[in-house]
C-alpha cells in the first residue's frame, strides 16, 4: 500500500496505525505525499513538506526502517532532520536516497551501521560532513554522488572494504577523487572538466565509465598500471589536447572498449589513427566501438603501422564514419591486422543537409582506400547515403 494511503487508513484503524508505524520502507516525495506542485510555491512546498516529514518520522517507531528515500523538487530548500533517526532509529537502514535537500551529519553520527547503498543527488553537504558520513558507513557497497556542487574533494577511506560500485556525476566544483577503497568493481565518472583521479591499486576493477575532456588520454596513459584486471571500458571525450600515445602499459584482460568523441567540440587536428594504440594495449580485446564525426581531410599519403596481428577482436563498429584521413587510416589498420574479425561496421549518423557532400566523400574514401584492402574472406557492404541522415554506412563482416 502506498504510504499516503497507509497514513489515511491509520487515522481510522488503531491496529493498522501500529503496523504503519513500523513500516520498513519510507518514501517521501511530492507524489507520495500528494502535493500538487502547481498549487504551491517552492517555499510553500518546502515548508509543507518539512512539516509532513517531521510529523511522520516523529510518529514512526523508528524500528526496522530499511529503505529511506527523500526527494524534493528543484529549488525547494529542506534541511533533512537526521537527528530524528540518530537515537537508534536508523540502525537498520540499508538504503538511503536523498534528493534536493541539505544534509549536515556530525562526527557523532552513528546510525548507519547497516547501510549498504547511499545515493546523494543535488544535496548540500560539505567535504567534512561527507567524510564523517562515509567513515561511519562500514558496510557500504554502493555509493552514488550526483550534482552535489558543494563537494571539492571526495575522499573514500580504505575502511570501506565492501564498496564495489562508485558513481560520481555532474559535481561542478569537484577537483579531486581520492579513493583508497580496495574492492571497487565498477567506477563511473562524468564531469565538465578533468579532475585529479587517484583510485589506488584498483585490482578488482572490471568496469570503467569515464566522460570528460581528456578522458581518452587519461585512460591510455594514467590508468593501465592501476587497473590490470579491467574488462570493460566506456570512454567519452569532448576534446583531446594530445594524440593517443604508444605505450608499453597494457590492459591485459580488456575485452570491450567503447570510445565516443563529441564532434561539435572535438579538435579537427586530432589524429584518429593514434587510437590504434589501444589495439596493441589490449591483447584480449574482442569488441571495439568508435563513435566519431569529423571534418573532411583529403585521404592521401596513407600511413601504416608495423604489422600487428590481433587475434581476438570479433567486432568493430565506427559510428559517424567520414572521409577524415586519420579515420580512414584507422579503418584500414583494422581490416588489415585483425585476423579474427567477424563484423566491422561504420554506420551513418544523423547529419544536417549541408554535409551531404561529405557523405559522398566518405563513400569515395571507402571505395578507394578501404575496399581494396578487405580480405577475400570478409564481406563488404556499402550503403548509399539515405535522405533521412545523408550519411554513409559501411559494414564489413566475415
Image (spheres, helix red, strand yellow):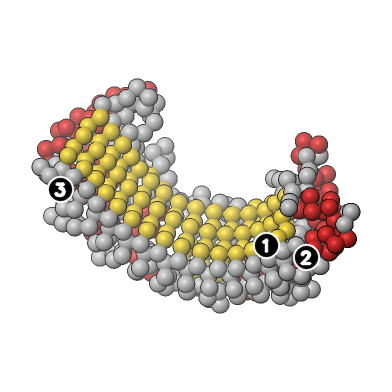
- Identify the residue at image location x=19%, y=53%: 340
Tell me the residue that label 3 is attached to: 336
Element under disc 1: strand
Q: Is residue 302 visible?
A: no
Which circle, 2 or 3, is nearer the viewer?
Answer: 2
Q: Earlier in the sequence, mark 1 or mark 2?
A: 2
Residue 188 image offset from top left, x and y in percent: 48, 57
- Left/right of residue 293 with respect to residue 311 in the rendered view: right
Element under disc 2: loop
Which circle, 1 or 2, is nearer the viewer?
Answer: 2
Gap in angstroms between the C-alphas marked 3 and 1: 55 Å
- Left/right of residue 304 with respect to residue 28 in the rendered view: left
Q: Is residue 93 above or below residue 310?
A: below
Q: Earlier in the sequence, mark 2 or mark 3?
A: 2
Residue 275 image offset from top left, x and y in percent: 28, 51
| Mark drawn on residue 11 | none
Q: Residues within 10 Å of mark 3 (few under 14, many from 20)?
A: some
Observer-nearest of 239 and 49: 49
Element under disc 3: helix
Which circle, 3 or 1, is nearer the viewer?
Answer: 1
Tell me the residue that label 2 is attached to: 22
Tell me the residue that label 1 is attached to: 67
Q: Earlier in the sequence, mark 3 or mark 1?
A: 1
Amino acid at each position: 500500500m502506498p504510504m499516503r494511503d497507509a497514513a489515511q487508513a491509520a487515522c481510522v484503524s488503531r491496529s493498522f496505525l501500529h503496523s504503519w508505524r513500523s513500516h520498513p520502507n519510507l518514501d517521501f516525495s511530492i507524489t507520495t505525499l500528494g502535493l500538487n506542485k502547481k498549487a504551491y510555491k517552492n517555499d510553500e512546498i518546502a515548508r509543507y513538506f518539512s512539516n509532513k516529514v517531521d510529523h511522520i518520522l516523529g510518529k514512526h517507531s523508528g524500528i526496522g526502517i530499511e529503505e529511506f528515500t527523500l526527494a524534493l523538487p528543484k529549488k525547494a530548500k529542506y534541511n533533512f532532520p537526521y537527528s530524528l533517526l540518530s537515537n537508534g532509529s536508523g540502525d537498520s537502514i540499508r538504503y538511503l536516497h536523498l534528493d534536493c535537500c541539505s544534509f549536515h551529519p556530525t562526527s557523532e553520527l552513528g546510525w548507519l551501521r547497516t547501510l549498504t547503498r547511499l545515493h546523494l543527488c543535488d544535496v548540500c553537504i560539505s567535504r567534512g560532513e561527507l567524510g564523517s558520513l562515509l567513515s561511519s558507513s562500514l558496510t557500504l557497497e554502493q555509493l552514488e554522488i550526483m550534482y552535489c556542487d558543494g563537494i571539492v574533494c571526495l575522499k573514500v577511506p580504505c575502511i570501506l572494504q565492501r564498496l564495489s560500485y562508485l558513481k560520481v556525476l555532474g559535481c561542478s566544483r569537484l577537483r579531486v577523487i581520492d579513493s583508497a577503497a580496495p574492492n571497487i568493481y565498477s567506477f563511473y565518472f562524468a564531469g565538465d572538466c578533468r579532475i585529479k583521479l587517484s583510485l589506488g591499486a584498483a585490482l578488482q576493477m572490471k568496469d570503467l565509465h569515464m566522460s570528460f575532456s581528456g578522458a581518452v588520454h587519461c585512460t591510455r596513459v594514467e590508468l593501465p598500471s592501476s587497473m590490470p584486471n579491467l574488462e570493460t571500458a566506456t570512454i567519452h571525450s569532448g576534446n583531446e589536447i594530445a594524440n593517443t600515445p604508444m605505450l608499453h602499459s597494457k590492459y591485459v584482460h580488456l575485452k570491450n572498449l567503447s570510445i565516443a568523441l563529441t564532434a561539435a567540440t572535438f579538435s579537427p587536428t586530432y589524429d584518429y589513427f593514434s587510437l590504434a594504440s589501444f589495439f596493441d594495449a589490449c591483447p584480449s580485446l574482442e569488441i571495439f566501438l568508435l563513435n566519431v564525426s569529423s571534418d573532411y581531410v583529403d585521404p592521401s599519403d596513407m600511413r601504416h603501422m608495423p604489422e600487428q596481428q590481433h587475434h581476438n577482436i570479433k567486432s568493430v563498429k565506427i559510428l559517424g564514419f567520414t572521409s577524415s584521413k586519420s579515420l580512414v587510416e584507422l579503418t584500414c589498420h583494422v581490416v588489415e591486422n585483425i585476423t579474427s574479425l567477424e563484423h566491422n561496421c561504420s554506420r551513418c549518423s544523423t547529419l544536417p543537409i549541408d554535409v551531404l557532400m561529405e557523405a559522398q566523400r566518405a563513400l569515395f574514401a571507402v571505395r578507394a582506400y578501404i575496399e581494396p584492402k578487405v580480405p577475400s574472406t570478409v564481406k563488404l557492404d556499402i550503403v548509399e547515403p539515405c535522405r533521412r541522415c545523408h550519411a554513409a554506412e559501411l559494414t564489413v563482416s566475415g
